[in-house]
Image (cartoon, rainbow, N blue to C red):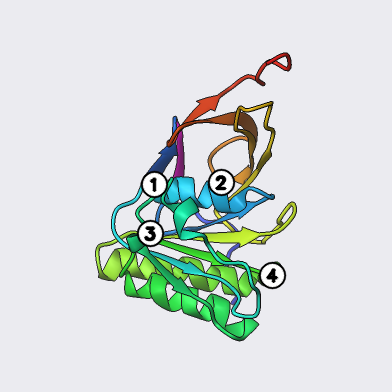
């Protein structure tokens, strides 16, 4: 007997984490942030959470978060940095943290795109935590370039669009289950970030 391709059960969106004006990320799910400003976007999302943030990055690279730079977004004391020595361990560590429900946000920097099966396991781990431990951890996969991880709940791309002394980024929602493709500009004012729906003037 074959399984049906369709179901009568409606898709129920997860509660969302509001991380910028009017924008949210479904919790107990895994999302993809890509583009050259993906780490900045992840730190903006971290600002909207409370409690510990686990940040996983390849142990064989020399790039690490700068505590002084992170201070503009969150208290560095909230961060737990993990640097597995093997590529296969990156997503395994992320899966175990999501399943434990010990942190509201788990960020994983990837050197390449994950397989669909691995992403599905991450979703399942986050959903199990929401069901068994009554918490809703959020997973963020940081991928280079234009990204393209299969099976993610949503995909966001952010890149610098600075004008003079103004710190501005172009933010694009390139994929989402329940939301249309859209783009905005994000501007920084001190430690605050505001969403601009129209491109900023070029004569500033």
Q: Secondary structure at mark 1?
A: helix
Which residue has dot 3 on it?
76
Earlier residue among tags 4 and 3 = 3
Q: Please give the name of the residue rendered at 55% of the width and 53% of the height, measured from the top-left corner.
A: 153
Q: Is residue 5 above or below residue 167?
A: below
Locate the C terminus by quadrant: top right
Which residue has dot 1 on it?
47
- Residue 177's tag is 2
Mark 3 against mark 1, which lies toward the viewer? 3
- Distance of label 3 from label 1 (alpha carbons): 11 Å
Q: Secondary structure at mark 3?
A: helix
- Distance of label 4 from label 3 (alpha carbons): 24 Å
How packed mark 1 is, by other alpha carbons closer than 10 Å (few <14, some 14-19, many 20 or more), is some
Q: Please give the name of the residue rendered at 25% of the width and 69% of the height, measured from the top-left corner.
A: 133
Q: Quadrant of residue 136?
A: bottom left
Q: Give the x, y percent position of residue 97.
A: 40, 74
Earlier residue among tags 1 and 4 = 1
Determine contact: label 2, label 1, CB under 8 Å: no
- Residue 82's tag is none
Q: Which residues are magenta?
A: 22-26
Which residue has dot 4 on it?
111
**Magenta stretch holds residue 24:** yes
Q: Is residue 135 above or below residue 192?
A: below
Q: Is residue 32 above or below residue 168?
A: below
Q: Please give the name of the residue rendered at 68% of the width and 26% of the height, measured from the top-left corner.
A: 164
- Distance of label 2 from label 1 (alpha carbons): 24 Å
């Amino acid at each position: 007997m074959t399984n049906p391709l369709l179901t009568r059960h409606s898709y129920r969106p997860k509660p969302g984490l509001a991380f910028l004006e009017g924008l949210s990320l479904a919790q107990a799910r895994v999302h993809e942030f890509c583009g050259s400003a993906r780490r900045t976007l992840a730190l903006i999302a971290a600002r909207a959470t409370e409690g510990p943030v686990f940040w996983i990055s390849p142990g064989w690279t020399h790039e690490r978060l700068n505590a002084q730079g992170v201070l503009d977004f969150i208290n560095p004391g909230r961060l737990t940095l993990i640097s597995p020595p093997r590529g296969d361990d990156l997503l395994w560590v992320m899966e175990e943290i999501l399943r434990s429900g010990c942190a509201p946000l788990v960020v994983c920097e990837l050197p390449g795109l994950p397989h669909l099966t691995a992403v599905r396991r991450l979703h399942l781990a986050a959903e199990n935590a929401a069901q068994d431990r009554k918490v809703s951890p959020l997973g963020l996969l940081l991928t280079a370039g234009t990204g393209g991880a299969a099976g993610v709940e949503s995909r966001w791309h952010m890149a610098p669009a600075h004008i003079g002394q103004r710190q501005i980024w172009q933010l694009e929602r390139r994929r989402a289950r329940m939301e249309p493709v859209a783009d905005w500009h994000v501007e920084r004012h001190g430690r605050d970030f505001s969403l601009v729906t129209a491109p900023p003037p070029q004569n500033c």
